[in-house]
Image (cartoon, rainbow, N blue to C red):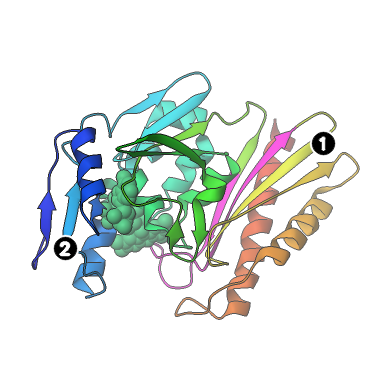
Amino acid sequence: MTGDARVHRPDSLEETTALLRDLDDAMVYGGGTAIQILRKQGLLFTEDYVDIARVPGLTDVVVTDDTVRIGALTPLRRVETDTRVRQLIPLASETYGHVANPRVRNTASAGGNIAHGDYRLDPPTALAVLDATVELTSSTGVRHVSIREFFTDFQETAIEHGELITAISVPAQPARARGAFAKMRALSRNDWPSASAAVLAVPDDGFIEIRIGLGAVAPTTVYLAFDLTADMDEQQAVDAAIDIANSAMDPIPDVRGSAAYKAQLGRVAVEEAVRRCLKEFARD
Ligand SMILES: Cc1cc2nc3c(=O)[nH]c(=O)nc-3n(C[C@H](O)[C@H](O)[C@H](O)COP(=O)(O)OP(=O)(O)OC[C@H]3O[C@@H](n4cnc5c(N)ncnc54)[C@H](O)[C@@H]3O)c2cc1C
């Protein structure tokens, strides 16, 4: 770390939460991929960083029959490639595999990714449709927040002073569910999205629940859902998904496109992901 930053390197979770409680304005240092760039750009003036690399247990990925518990410091690349994770939550593995490039994915952590709070992040779209839960730990205990409520506003999250993310728990994808992630980029193959969509189609009694997570088209990740009834064909499913997505999109114009362009790419991403899910059912 360059400049006048003080880096604290606690050896335990207790030490970490005590530092985060006692220091006024400390930031947790995860993989450092966002922090290093923001510091180099002169956009980050925090003096105290709490590097959690020595804290035991934060890179554990615990897979049971019905849940994957991803330790906060687990590299994104591991969520992408771990075979047990791929079996239980294939949509999450697919989506994590779309972040930036392998170099970033090998360094960036699962906790740092969501804590970063950027509205364009890819993983939260899949985590939202999979109904993941964020585990937040402080010196007073542990609390759990649904990922669907974790992003509270533009660049803001539910993390409170003194807390760090210790894990993300993701329920197993229902066996008959099918998922797909579509990412539309305006600049290069490894770039941030102009729009993205994760879709999970979950068959139920006589209908299919269509869950949609949208990235980059509103100030926060968006979560939406509707039921697809037995009398609706694929085109009607796509039309319904686009209708509900339209009502939630509020894109921020920037170098990756105007608001209208991003909204159009949002519609394309939703259509692509919905069609891919439904085609999987047809193949089964
Ligand atoms: C070139 C480049 C391209 C990128 N493209 C994409 C993309 O296409 N899609 C995408 O989704 N992302 C993209 N990213 C963002 C990338 O996903 C994030 O930089 C990364 O996930 C942040 O993780 P980290 O562990 O490095 O976080 P850090 O840089 O360590 O921290 C980021 C923020 O999270 C906080 N934090 C870290 N860990 C914790 C924790 N355990 N508890 C609480 N707070 C914590 C830090 O205090 C800081 O505020 C890109 C990044 C780069 C550098």
| Secondary structure type for disc 1 | strand
Q: Residue at x 54, y 28 (%)?
A: 172
Percent from the top left, x then y, of residue 208? Answer: 77, 38
Quarter of the view holding residue 93: top left
Amino acid type of the residue that numbered disc 2 sits on in the rendered structure: Glu
Instruction: Tell me if residue 265 comes above or below residue 255 in the rendering.
Output: above
Quadrant of the image containing the N terminus: bottom left
Where is ligand 1, by quadrant? bottom left
Q: Secondary structure at mark 2?
A: loop
- Side of 204 where 83 appears, left or right: left
Residue at horizontal 87%, vertical 39%?
A: 230
Residue drawn at x 44%, y 36% as measured from the top left: 143
Q: Is residue 192 magenta?
A: yes
Which residue has dot 1 on it? 207
Q: Is residue 151 shown to the viewer in this render?
A: yes
Q: Nearer the viewer, residue 25 or 247?
A: 25
Q: How many discs appear? A: 2
- The residue that disc 2 covers is 47
Q: Is residue 3 left or right of residue 237?
A: left
Query: In the picture shown, does residue 283 fall above or below 274?
Result: above
In space, the residues marked 2 and 1 are separated at their CA atoms by 53 Å
